[in-house]
Amino acid sequence: EGVAEAAVVGGQHEMKGEAVYAYVITEESQEESDAFREEIVAAVEEAIGPIARPERVIFTPELPKTRSGKIMRRLLEDIANGDELGNTSTLRNPDVVHDIQEKVRGD
């Protein structure tokens, strides 16, 4: 409840090797708060278990999608790892990548 859409990817982590990063679009009525982040983490732990606990929950207004509507998780992994971004020419909205990068840096 409160989540309109989400994408989850693995990203590098200094201690764990790899960690879970969740990119979340909230419903219009849901405030993007630290309390809601914790609710998301708790819900994942309860439904799947502690192994799936997101290291970071990043609120974003949009996910990078191709023109056919597929989420480009590869780009989300690149952003999580701070890597050079690959080809973004097939994105429906190329500006969303910059917006997500800013959110990741700001969180």
Image (cartoon, rainbow, N blue to C red):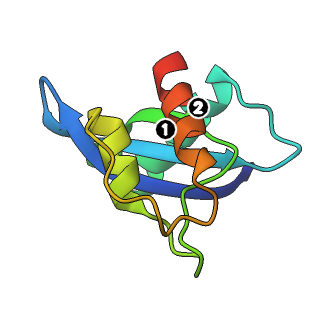
* Residue 97 visible, this angle: yes
Which residue is at the front of the view, 31 or 106? 106
Instruction: For label 1, count other residues whose C-alpha is less than 10 Å away and answer few (under 14), some (14-19) or many (20+).
Output: some
Q: Secondary structure at mark 2?
A: helix
Q: Which mark is residue 37?
A: 2
Q: Is residue 102 left or right of residue 15?
A: right
Give the residue at mark 1.
41
- Residue 22 image point, x, y percent: 46, 45
- Residue 32 image point, x, y percent: 72, 30
Q: Is residue 17 left or right of residue 102?
A: left
Q: Is residue 96 left or right of residue 26?
A: left
- Name the image quarter holding residue 80: top left
Q: Are marks 1 and 2 in contact (CB under 8 Å)?
A: yes
102, above or below 76, in the image: above
Amino acid type of the residue that numbered disc 2 sits on in the rendered structure:
Arg
Instruction: For label 2, count other residues whose C-alpha is less than 10 Å away and answer few (under 14), some (14-19) or many (20+).
Output: some
Furthest toward the front, the residue is 89
Which residue is at the front of the view, 15 or 69? 69
* Residue 49 visible, this angle: no
Amino acid type of the residue that numbered disc 1 sits on in the rendered structure:
Val
- Name the image quarter holding residue 5: bottom right
- Residue 2 image point, x, y percent: 75, 48
**Residue drawn at the location 53% of the way across and 71% of the way down:** 66
- Residue 36 image point, x, y percent: 66, 32
38, above or below 54, in the image: above
**Residue drawn at the location 31% of the way across and 54% of the way down:** 86
Which residue is at the front of the view, 77 or 56? 77
Q: Secondary structure at mark 1?
A: helix
Q: How many marks?
A: 2
**Residue drawn at the location 40% of the way across and 49% of the way down:** 76
